[in-house]
Amino acid sequence: MQVTRCFQHSDDCCLVTHREEQRQLSKEHAMEKYRPGVSWLEPAIYRVCIQGILDKNWSKYCGGMTIEYENDPHHRAVTILTGRLADQSALIGLLTSLHDIGCPILSVERLEAE
């Protein structure tokens, strides 16, 4: 297995295998091919569905997202959070927060970039 040295830090270097490097490049290429021009650093509108009912008072905790309710085909309660997030790091933060308070995440959808 070929090993490539990567000098990202002046006093510390990391070793990356050629195979891992190839895998990372192919992931990036696949994402660019799937959604050309989409940047994970730009603001976007997201729709996150969770199982159960999350009180509307949690909106501020969830980045100011709008909270609405509907039932799924099996008549279970679903909470839908919709709103603008600064970037995908903010999205990951929201998902982590929902997980931390015990909300089962059903789906995440990027609706549009701003």
Image: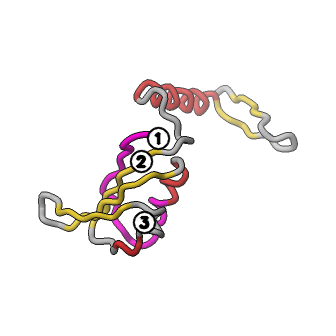
Q: Which residue lies furthest to the front in this view?
A: 114
Q: Which of the 4 image quadrants contains residue 21?
A: top right
Question: Alpha carbon of mark 2 to alpha carbon of mark 1: how far?
Answer: 7 Å
The amino acid type found where label 1 is placed reads: Glu
User: In the structure shown, which secondary structural element does the residue marked by tag 2 occupy?
Assistant: strand
Q: Which of marks 3 and 2 is in front?
A: 2
Is 87 above or below relative to 82?
above
Q: Nearer the viewer, residue 109 or 10?
A: 109
Are circles 1 and 3 on residues that touch, CB within 8 Å?
A: no
* Residue occupying the point 71% across, 29% down: 4
* Residue occupying the point 65% across, 32% down: 17
Are circles 2 and 1 on residues that touch, CB within 8 Å?
A: yes
Residue at mark 1: 114
* Residue occupying the point 63% across, 28% down: 18
Is 85 above or below relative to 39?
below
User: In the structure shown, which secondary structural element does the residue marked by tag 3 occupy?
Assistant: helix
Are circles 3 and 2 on residues that touch, CB within 8 Å?
A: no
| Quarter of the image that includes the N terminus | top right
Q: Which of the 4 image quadrants contains residue 50?
A: bottom left
Q: Give the range drawn in magenta.
A: 94-114
The amino acid type found where label 2 is placed reads: Ile
Check disc 2: other Cα within 10 Å, few if <14, some if 14-19, many if 20+: some
Residue at mark 2: 45
Q: Which of the 4 image quadrants contains residue 112?
A: top left
Q: Where is residue 78 in the image (x, y as percent from the top left)?
A: 24, 64
Residue at mark 3: 98
Which of disc 2 and disc 3 is earlier in sequence?
Answer: 2
The amino acid type found where label 3 is placed reads: Leu
